[in-house]
Image (cartoon, coloured by chain):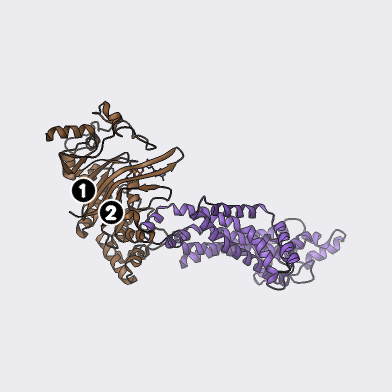
Chain colours: A brown, B purple
Amino acid sequence: MKRILDVKNLQVSLPTPNGDLRAVRGIDLHVNKGEMLCIVGESGCGKSMTSMALMGLLPKRAEVTADAMQFDGMDLLSLSKKERNQVRGMRMSMIFQEPMTSLNPSYTLGNQLCEGIIKHKKVSKDEAKKRAVYLLECAGVPYPEKRLDQYPHQLSGGLRQRVMIAMALMCEPDLIIADEPTTALDVTIQAQILRLIRELQQEFGTAVIFITHDLGVVARIADRVAVMYAGQVVETASAQDLFSDPQHPYTKGLLNCIPVPGKTLPGSHLESIPGVVPSLIGELKGCAFENRCSVSIGECCYRSPSLENHLGSEDHQVRCSIATASSFREAV
Amino acid sequence: MLVFIFRRLLVALSVAITVSIVSFMLLHLSGDLAISIAGPESTAEQVEQIRIDFGLDKPMVYQYFDWLWSAVQLDFGRSYYFQDTVMSLISDRLPVTLTLGGLALGLATVIAIPLGVIAAIKQDTWIDRLALTIAVIGQAMPSFWFGLTLIVVFAVNLHWLPAGGNETWQHFVLPAIALGYYAMPAMMRLTRTGMLEVLNSDYIRTARSKGLNESSVIFKHALRNAVIPVVALAAVELGFMLGGSVVIESVFSLKGLGQLAWDAITRNDYPVVQAVVLIIAVFYILLTFLADVINAMLDPRLRVR
Ligand SMILES: Nc1ncnc2c1ncn2[C@@H]1O[C@H](COP(=O)(O)OP(=O)(O)OP(=O)(O)O)[C@@H](O)[C@H]1O
Ligand SMILES: [Mg+2]
């Protein structure tokens, strides 16, 4: 399958008063054309930093490096500012976590929906509006024509997120990054938005990086999954493999935290992973998950594991010395 | 929008009425006007005569409506001190003050907003520090001193501009600079803080994610939202300059409203004081109304309230 995005060893660090905060510590990622990749991990593990780095939206003081950052054959890091602007917005777009504040309160929705396509594709205002109405309709916004003249404050959060989704689709991008697009919405709306993103992704054949901290969400929409912990990818696999054959202790822990209908009894104790995420300032010695891991051995304290193929397959990779060792034994 | 403007007008009108009552009361409750007009050496008969001549023997409410009716017809009676009607005094002075205030505010805006925007974009660089230094100097320096410095440099030494008077537009240049520099820092700082806040907001991130040019991010998406509090401040500052530019007016011997008010107050010239207070108050109300309308045009959320 053809890769639309291919990232090698992405690192992001932010200067803080206590030293450099290394929020992303060497991430390898790829997204195939038209697929849904879910990045999952708990709060603060660097999911947003990763997506901002991919979009080129990090503040200037953030330092971004990577061995490779290929988007459809282009090296994103070597593009000029203008070329980068062209790619961002036209070929990749983003849906944010906060629908309430992500639209400019002073401009009509029509204006905000159309400005990107007018700039990038040089279409007329009327054509842009037509497309906006069509996409609003696809995104399930009632009375799409009327919306063009409305302002963000006249819409509910769920509707605003639908508008953001339509906006992300305006220029027919190849890749959409959705950073926890349902977290700020209430549960019934969450399910609707989730279904909508999945449907549109399949209908338009757009590749999507869907960021979430909820494995339940992953189970419903992902083609492939990357599990992140403390700024690194600790396991990546197809959704099916990840749920049926998780390898990393952290992934297993996360899976144990999901209540399963029928199995988890009402009122029974819900699992959680004990311990806290290590500080991301400075170097980490050994495996980042070591202090919370139930199967760690002495070696884990000082040896940093690398991302290794599981059972010789590139499609399932794990960053855990113990899992790799046992997989090696199985293979032999 | 029309409904909004209509509602704001009603509010403005009710404030204006309140102000007129207060300014009427202030004078009439501050002592027996007939005595203070007649002067300390007058006899009781003379005081009585004055009371009848000036209508001061009538009931208070009657006097108020009488005065208000004249006032809306721009008839504020005669000055006690200047041998002239109050209206002709004011129509001499008001244009001077309006020109000065308008020029000063225009100058302040033209400098404050771009400077504030640049300072915010270049936060923590030498440009930002320079802008803040310029602002601090403007705030710390007494305006009469800055005015005198301008006179010494540009009028006395260089002979570029006149030192005082209000005959030609050139007479307004130096006082407008002095007054404008006084009004500029607060607007500049407010623009800068507003821009910093807005540039950090989620919708700016959205605008950037659309791949818009930096200029369109800053001028279309950020400035419009950042400038809203600055508009309100500008209205207050202009109102303040109309009433409170006595210092600059005397430094540059401009015959403006400030000077007139000062002269009238020191001479117990009540009709003049009253008229000036009322006119400045009405201007304040108009300016606030205007600022509200401008802000409602900038931000649709303000239109509903
Ligand atoms: N502007 C910032 N300045 C300094 N540190 C930051 C900043 N933004 C985020 N961080 C830190 O960077 C790390 C990664 O943050 P990031 O926002 O990528 O997490 P996340 O995985 O998206 O979490 P969440 O699920 O809460 O959105 C965190 O430790 C966070 O504290
Ligand atoms: Mg986040």
> How many numbered callouts?
2
Compared to B266, does A20 lie above or below? Answer: above
Secondary structure state at the residue bearing disc 2? strand
Q: Nearer the viewer, mark 2 or mark 1?
A: 2
Residue at mark 2: A70
Image side of residue A61 versus residue A141, left or right: right
- Residue B237: mark in rendering: none
Taking depth in this image into account, of A115 and A50 the one nearest to the observer is: A50
Q: Is residue B14 left or right of residue B260?
A: left
Question: Are the residues under badges 2 and 1 in a single subunit?
Answer: yes
A226 and A163: which is toward the camera = A226
Q: Amino acid at mark 1?
A: Ala
Residue shown at the point (75%, 60%) measured from the top left: B265
Secondary structure of the residue carrying numbered label 1: loop
- The picture quadrant where one finds residue A87 is bottom left
Q: In which quadrant is the C terminus of chain A drawn?
A: top left
